[in-house]
Amino acid sequence: MAEEKRIRVLVAKPGLDGHDRGAKVIVRALRDAGMEVIYTGLRQTPEQIINAVVQEDVDALLLSILSGAHNYIFPRIMEGLKEKGVNDILVVGGGVIPNEDIPALKAIGISEIFGPGTTTQTIIDYIKGNLVKRA
Amino acid sequence: MELFEQALKGSSRAIAKLITLVENRGEGADEVMEKIYPHTGRAYITGFTGPSGSGKSTLVDKVTLKLCEQGFTVGIIAIDPSSPFTGGALLGDRLRMRNVDTQEKVFIRSLSTRGCLGGLSKATCNITRILDACGKDFILIETVGAGQDEVEIMSIADTSIVVLMPGMGDEIQTIKAGVMEIGDIFVVNKSDWEGAERTVQMIQMMFDLKQSENKWVSPVIKTIATEDAGTSEVVEKLLSHREYLSQSGKFLERRRERIKAEIKKMVEERISAQVKSLIEEHTSFNLMVEEVVLRKKDLYACVRELTVPLKKLR
C-alpha cells in the first residue's frame, strides 16, 4: 500500500543576497510540476541550509545566489553536507555565476549551474532526469 | 534495523529518513512503526491551528525557543496544503522559524497534506510517534490553517492552541461550530492591530454562552509574535494545561479515546481496501453496473447481491 512518492526539493538563498524574485519563480514552477518545495527564505547561513537538507531529507538542493559570493559559500555548503554524511542528493546552482567559475563548482559536486534566461521547464526536466537513486 | 537504532540514538539524518520511509509507506514502514511503538508515549503533543496568516509559524518559533531555554527538546511538524491539481506543495513554514532552525534540541519537518482534508497529512500521527520515540519532550504540530472544519488536530494533540487575529469577521463566526470549539488555549496574535480587544471579548463571550462541564477555562492571550510579546504567557498556559490534564486524569482519558478512534480507523481502512478489491474482482461486476445503469436491475438489489458473499468474511 505504498503512497505516491513526491520529489522533495530545498530552494535556498545563501549569504547576504537580498533578491529572491527568481528563486520564488522557480519555487512556484516546481510546485506546479508536482514537487514538494521547501523554500528557506533569504539570508541563510550554510549551517541553516545543511540542517534543512538533513531534517527534510530532500532529493535535491537548489542554491540561488546573485551576490557573487558563490565561490566562497558553495564549497562551504558542500563540505558541510559531506560532514553530515549527505552524499546522495542532487545539488544545482543558479543566479549570477560567471562561466569561468562553473568548472570549479562542478568539481566540488554541483551538477549544473543555471544562469539567467534558463527556462523553468529546463530546470524541472533536469531535476526529474538527474535525481540520484537513493536507498 | 540500523536506521532505527541510529534514529533512537538521536541521529537527525536517520530520523529524517525514517520519516520519509513512513510518509511514503515504503517497504518496511509498518515494521518500523511496530518497533517504534513501545518507545512512544513520553512526548507532549501540542497543536497549533487557525487561519492562514494568523502567525502560527512565528508563534511556534518563539514558543519553541522558550521551551528550549527551559531545557526541553522539541520536534516541530509544519504542514502546508498540496495543490489539488498538481499534487505539489510549497512548504513555507520553516522559513519563519529562524530562531530555532539550527538549535540542536530542535527537529523541524515540513509536510504536505498530500490531498488530505482536515488540516493534517495522513502520516502526521506516525511521524509524531517517530519524534516521540527519538526523545523529543514536546512535539508541536502546525496545521494547514485553512478553515472552520480543521479539527483533526484534536485527534492527535494533548493541547490544542487556536491562533487568531483581529478583524476576522463578525460575532457569528465565533459561535459557529468547528475550530472555535477545540481550543484549550486561544491566542489573538497581531494584537497591535485594530480590533484586537474586541476579538478577545468575542471569544470570551463565547465561553459564557457555552455550557461548560470543564474545570479548565480556555485562556485568551494577546500576542505580537514577531516582537515576542505575550509568548511567555502562551508557554506558561501550555505547561499549566499539561499540569491540569495530568492532575485531573483527563490526560489518560483523552489518550484512551484517541487510541480507540485510531484503532477503529485503521481497521476500517484495511477492511475497506479488501472489500473494494473483492467487489471489483466479482466476475459479474461490470455486467451488474450496466444493468443498474439501464434500470434492468435495481441499485439496492445489486448491493444486496454483492454483500452476500462478503458476509462470509466475518
Image: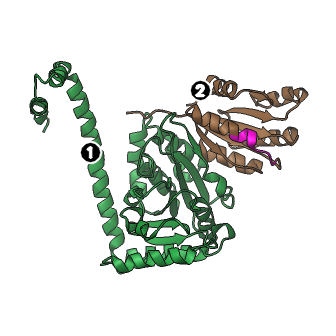
* Residue A106, x across and y down, in percent: 80, 28
Q: Are marks 2 and 1 on the same chain?
A: no
Q: Residues within 10 Å of mark 1 (few under 14, many from 20)?
A: few
Q: Residue furthest right?
A: A100
Horizontal relation, residue A42 to residue B314: left or right: right
Q: Is residue B19 visible?
A: yes
* Residue A2, x across and y down, in percent: 41, 33
- In the picture, the disc for residue B267 is 1
Q: Amino acid at mark 2?
A: Lys
Which corner quadrant of the image does residue B290 belong to? top left
**Which residue is more in the foreground, B139 or B174?**
B174
Which corner quadrant of the image does residue B309 belong to? top left
- How is the protein colored in the picture? by chain
Residue, x 85% and y 28% (percent of image)? A102
> What residue is pinned by disc 2?
A133
Q: Is residue B19 above or below residue B210?
A: above
Horizontal relation, residue B228 to residue A134: left or right: right
Q: Is residue B80 above or below residue B74?
A: above
Which corner quadrant of the image does residue B267 belong to? top left
Q: Is residue A20 magenta?
A: yes
Q: Secondary structure at mark 1?
A: helix
Q: Amino acid at mark 1?
A: Val
In the figure, what tint was chain A given? brown
Residue, x 50% and y 53% (percent of image)? B144
**Which residue is more in the foreground, B201 or B11?**
B201
Span of residues in magenta: A18-24
Question: Disc 2 is attached to a residue of which chain?
Answer: A
Q: Is residue A59 visible?
A: no
Horizontal relation, residue B21 to residue B151: left or right: right
In the figure, what tint was chain B given? green
* Residue B173, x across and y down, in percent: 42, 66
Q: Secondary structure at mark 2?
A: loop
